[in-house]
Image (cartoon, helix red, strand yellow):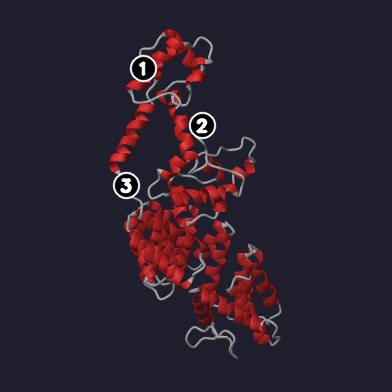
């Protein structure tokens, strides 16, 4: 088994690396799927060793690979030192055991941990716990590092972003980058903030800066691919996804996104076809009251809730004639109106039958559990492209999704049949479906 090492750094060597070196090992482990798997095997190979050094190294290794419960349990058995207490705090924070994490960070100061680093980690922990005022007090205690520490400005910006102070957050992220141009977290948050605010040019620039680093920042590449795709730069988008898949070949979101991009390359926008479609919609929305019809016909349509030409296309001759007081004279009268527009009774029903073989229409179950409909769209575990489209449509919950039709989704920029089918399949897993027009 190949040992995972950042050049010259081995977590399981006879002597434990420094905290800075362990951080580099962690970054290296997560830069590719192969590295992560190999490092996990390395942790397993040492997990039963009982020497104090091995127990400590394995506990840190478990934390690095995200096995947080095991990491906490293993580190409990290690001798107290700053490395143990800090990585124990990181694992506890991920487990949302915030008070214990703070206690562990505070205790690490007795063993020589850097006071500034501990204060910043405590602030990050309070931020994760949504205790913003306490986090701000921690950061205020090291304000003398203003314009000195990039990490201080990054943590301050992250707190401000969590509180909704976006302009102030951007200023602090930019200051962090002035002090440390390669600060990856500050680059990503700055790019993401510009992305959300609609400044795609600035977002692309910052995402590209992250992409130039030797390590693969997956979320940055995925977000950059989304922006490129929105711009119609499908080759650039595909390049970003290919880079992700080179290092993380089983990354499900990247795999789905790659299919979407390939689908987008084959999509051709027919301007004339769209114009014809718009004209047809306008015709269908024409009110019945715009035409000179008999009083009897008008009264019948009102009682049948037929108000537009589109409504008329959804009923058949037999249905109209079966209605009380609607006779052959009224039928001939309405046929003349429809013929003048190139339409006929029951036309919409025929079109629906033709389309049924391609995509099944669904309706929201009336008795759908409200709690289920209130779940966020994150529960659908969609690809980046599909999630981005839902964000543009201001769709946040499963209920919001089920109130949309397939036509509404397909009308969103760069949203294709692949993404539509992905959403349909995801909804089916919850017993839900998109809205039907009928």
Q: CA distance from mark 1 to mark 2?
A: 25 Å
Query: Which of the numbered marks, if any, corresponds to residue 438?
Result: 2
Q: Are marks 2 and 3 in contact (CB under 8 Å)?
A: no
Quadrant in which residue 344 is drawn = top left
Q: CA distance from mark 2 to mark 3?
A: 27 Å
Q: Residues within 10 Å of mark 1 (few under 14, many from 20)?
A: few
Residue 249 image point, x, y percent: 49, 69
Query: Which of the numbered marks, if any, corresponds to residue 336?
Result: 1
Position of residue 236 relative to residue 336, above or below, is below
Decide if residue 206 is in sight here: yes
Please tell me which residue lies in front, 260 or 321.
Answer: 321
Please tell me which residue lies in front, 372 or 414.
Answer: 414
Quadrant in which residue 149 is drawn = bottom left
Query: SS at mark 2?
Result: loop
Q: CA distance from mark 1 to mark 3?
A: 35 Å
Pointer 3 residue: 269
Residue 84 image point, x, y percent: 63, 78
Residue 269 image point, x, y percent: 32, 47
């Amino acid at each position: 088994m190949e040992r995972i090492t950042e050049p010259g750094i081995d977590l399981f060597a006879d002597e434990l690396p420094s905290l800075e070196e362990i951080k580099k090992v962690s970054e290296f482990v997560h830069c590719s799927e192969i590295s992560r798997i190999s490092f996990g095997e390395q942790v397993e190979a040492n997990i039963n060793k009982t020497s104090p050094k091995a127990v400590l190294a394995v506990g840190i290794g478990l934390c690095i690979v995200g096995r947080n419960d095991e990491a906490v349990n293993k580190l409990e058995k290690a001798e107290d030192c700053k490395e143990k207490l800090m990585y124990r705090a990181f694992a506890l924070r991920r487990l949302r055991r915030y008070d214990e994490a703070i206690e562990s960070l505070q205790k690490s100061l007795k063993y020589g941990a850097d006071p500034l680093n501990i204060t910043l980690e405590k602030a990050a922990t309070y931020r994760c716990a949504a205790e913003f005022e306490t986090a701000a007090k921690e950061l205020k205690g090291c304000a003398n590092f203003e314009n000195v520490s990039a990490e201080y400005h990054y943590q301050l910006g992250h707190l401000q972003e969590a509180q909704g102070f976006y302009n102030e957050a951007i200023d602090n992220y930019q200051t962090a980058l002035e002090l440390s141009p390669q600060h990856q977290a500050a680059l990503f948050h700055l790019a993401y903030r510009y992305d959300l605010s609609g400044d795609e040019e600035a977002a692309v620039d910052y995402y590209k800066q992250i992409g130039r680093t030797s390590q693969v920042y997956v979320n940055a590449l995925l977000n950059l691919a989304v922006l490129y795709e929105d711009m119609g730069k499908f080759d650039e988008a595909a390049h970003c996804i290919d880079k992700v898949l080179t290092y993380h070949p089983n990354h499900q979101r990247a795999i789905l996104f790659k299919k979407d991009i390939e689908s987008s390359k084959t999509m051709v926008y027919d301007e004339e076809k769209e114009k014809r479609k718009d004209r047809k919609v306008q015709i269908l929305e024409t009110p019945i009251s715009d035409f000179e019809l008999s009083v009897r016909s008008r009264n019948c349509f009102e009682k049948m809730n037929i108000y537009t030409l589109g409504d008329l296309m959804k009923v058949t001759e037999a249905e109209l004639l079966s209605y009380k007081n609607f006779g052959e004279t009224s039928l001939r009268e309405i046929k003349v109106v429809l013929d003048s527009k190139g339409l006929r009774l029951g036309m919409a029903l025929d079109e629906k039958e033709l389309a049924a073989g391609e995509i099944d229409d669904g309706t929201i179950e009336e008795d759908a559990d409200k709690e289920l409909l209130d779940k966020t769209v994150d529960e659908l575990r969609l690809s980046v492209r599909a999630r981005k489209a839902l964000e543009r449509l201001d769709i946040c919950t499963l209920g919001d999704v089920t109130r949309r039709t397939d036509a509404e989704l397909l009308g969103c920029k760069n949203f294709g049949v692949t993404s539509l089918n992905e959403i349909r399949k995801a909804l089916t897993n919850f017993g839900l479906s998109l809205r039907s027009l009928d």
